[in-house]
Image: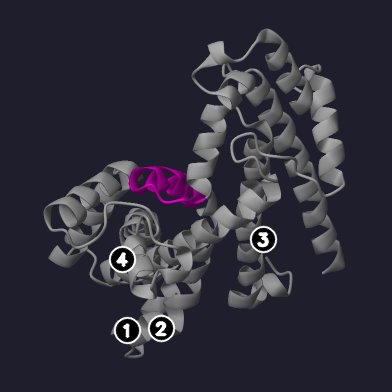
Amino acid sequence: MGVYLFKNVFKIILLLLAVSTLSFILVSNSPIDPVRSYIGADMTSVSPEQRENIAEYWGLNEPVLQQFFNWGTHLLQGDMGTSLIYRAPVAEVIAERFVASLALMSVAWMLSGLFGFILGIVAGMKEGTWLDRIIKGYCFTLASTPAFWLGLLLLMLFAVQLGWFPVGLSTPAGILADDVTFIERLRHFILPALTLSVVGVANVALHTRQKLIDVLNSDYVRFARAKGESGSKLVWRHGLRNISLPAISLHFSSFGELFGGAVLAEQVFSYPGLGQAVVEAGLGGDVPLLLGIVLCSTLFVFAGNFIADLLYKVVDPRIRKGEL
């Protein structure tokens, strides 16, 4: 276990180094001027000397390598820098936004995994029937549906036409956070979470269906059927562990797709989460905030894969004993 943990720590260090270097290079070559974004649209109100002072204050007049070295040095000391857009420490901005995004992504992730796994089992057990064809058609449609497009449809239907849910934001506008009730927060939360969860169902359902079909056509399942086992009892005793491993692998590896979908969903619903912050940081040339979010999202995706590896050992004893 010690060697296993050391390997994963070494991997994440190399991954963070590579991601931060590549991200800094891409942001540095962006056509967006951070000073212009900091000042705003009216550049005429600021003299050239003031622009130079702003660039010097933020360290933007230094060579790119020096900027990267300064940022990395402060990062190792626990300082992620100050956001140009929010005028606040990057760590505070990310912490505040990440809580909102984590709640959204967690609910969507659990719902998509649960319903995807159930639909995959039903489709696999009813292979070739009308129920199987309906589930496959539903999943193929979802797999080719962008998250932002589905979000717009849900927004137009349930918020604009039916008026069941608010158009956007995470709380009602003009009300203090302490005065917002749980029901109001839930009403603002449902549509973004529904958008993410519905899109994530397809992959889990299709892969679970195919794996269950392979398991049901195996020799040991034929032998079990010859002994009189059938239906859900057969799947529970002989198929559940075999179809769980691919579902776990796929669902935990979808952390990256979940974060990407959250970026689009939060833009559609104006949900103040980490996804909306990364768009604002990219368009505003906010290098410290953008790099901080990139590193946090990298850790988020790596954590998903790491948890999946640990669950493999719980689900399959052969992996735990080193037989596979």
The amino acid on which the numbered mark 2 sits, given as a three-letter code, is: Trp
Tell me: residue 298, above or below residue 184.
above
Q: Residue at x 67, y 60 (%)?
A: 306
Which residue is disc 3 drawn over?
A: 306
Crowd band around label 1 with a 10 angstrom C-alpha radius: few (<14), some (14–19), many (20+): some
As rendered, which of 30 and 227 lies closer to the eye? 30
Distance CA(mark 4)–CA(mark 2)? 37 Å
Residue type, mark 1 in image: Ser
Per the image, the residue denoted by label 1 is 232
> From the viewer's perspective, is residue 58 above or below residue 185?
above
Q: Is residue 14 visible?
A: yes
Tell me, yes or no, whether the two marked residues, 1 and 2, touch with CB atoms within 8 Å. yes
Checking the image for residue 187, the label placed there is 4
Distance Cα–Cα, label 2 vs label 3:
27 Å
- Asked if disc 3 and disc 1 are in contact, CB closer than 8 Å, the reply is no
Q: How is the image coloured?
A: one colour
